[in-house]
Image (cartoon, helix red, strand yellow):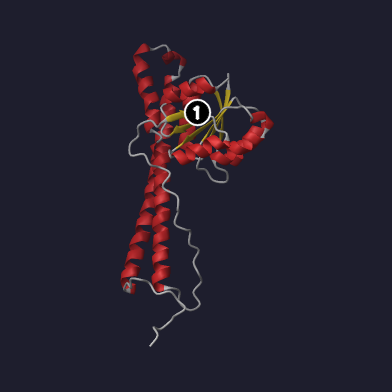
Amino acid sequence: MPLILAVDDSPSMRKMVSFTLTGAGYQVVEAVDGVDAYEKAQAQSFDLVLTDQNMPRLDGLGLTRKLRDHPQFKTTPILMLTTESSDLMKQAGRAAGATGWLVKPFDPARLLEVIKKVIK
Amino acid sequence: MQPNQTTTPVPAVQLPVMLVAEVQDSLLVVVHDLNRLDGLLAHTMANLMERFTSASANLADPVLVASKELDAVRSALRAAVTELQFQDMASQLIIHTSKILQGCAYRLASESMGLEDGEAVPFVEDVPERPNPVTQDEMYAGSVELF
């Protein structure tokens, strides 16, 4: 089963994302911020990264840039899941190398649909 | 005669010190209350999560998995995932708003009253310049855009 790295500083959001993904058969590793996520990404490979934007220490855009610099994550789908909905932020996400931009709150069925679409 | 030149900037609108103090106090009370609200939401959410996890685990019991009668319950639980994201959004909204109010309170005081002799300059977090990250008014699912 595909392995997904779910990154969010909010425990309730991590729980909701994990509930949705594991219920659909995905394996999930949780990270509490960008730094934690990057450390976990260096230790193992993931099929998809789903990350929040506003987090302490390292935000989602910073994490995306760092992962794209990492040879193992050049083509891994990275989805931003955030409250941010401005075009400016979306453009920054695209420039950083994100695969897509999902605005919170997410609908479980729609999230699974998008993941199925982008995951290889 | 030349107007009196001073080295300290004079506020365009002079406010009585007592008024400034009262406004600053009120702003700080609101900030304190918003922090309490954030705490209440976090506590509520933790309890809700516990019950949500417990209900999900019970429904996953092998004895109940095949039960068609419980499909509606499972479906309702899945649908609740969208609404259960309210705390993350509310918390971001509250924290951002608190920072703005706190910045206003300190700025109002420092620009109107200045510091007394020997008083240390308090650490004041700047008023956030960026707009609030949460613009949603309702808990409908947000947009999806693939690049």
Residue found farthest to the front: B1
Q: What residue is at 48 percent from the left and 37 percent from the top? A: A90
Nearest the viewer among B38 and B63 is: B38
Q: Secondary structure at mark 1?
A: helix
Disc 1 crowd rating (10 Å Cα; few below 14, some 14-19, many 20+) is many
Check disc 1 and report the residue beneath it. A18
- At horizontal 64% and vertical 33% (from top left) the residue drawn is A41
Q: Is residue B146 left or right of residue B41?
A: right
Quarter of the image where one finds residue B5: bottom left
**Tag 1, which chain?**
A
Q: Is residue A60 above or below residue A118?
A: below
Q: Is residue B73 shown above or below A64? A: above
**Where is B55 relative to B41, above or below?**
above
The residue under the point 66% across, 36% down is: A69
Question: Can I make out residue A33 in this image?
Answer: no
Residue A105 location (% of width, % of height): 41, 33
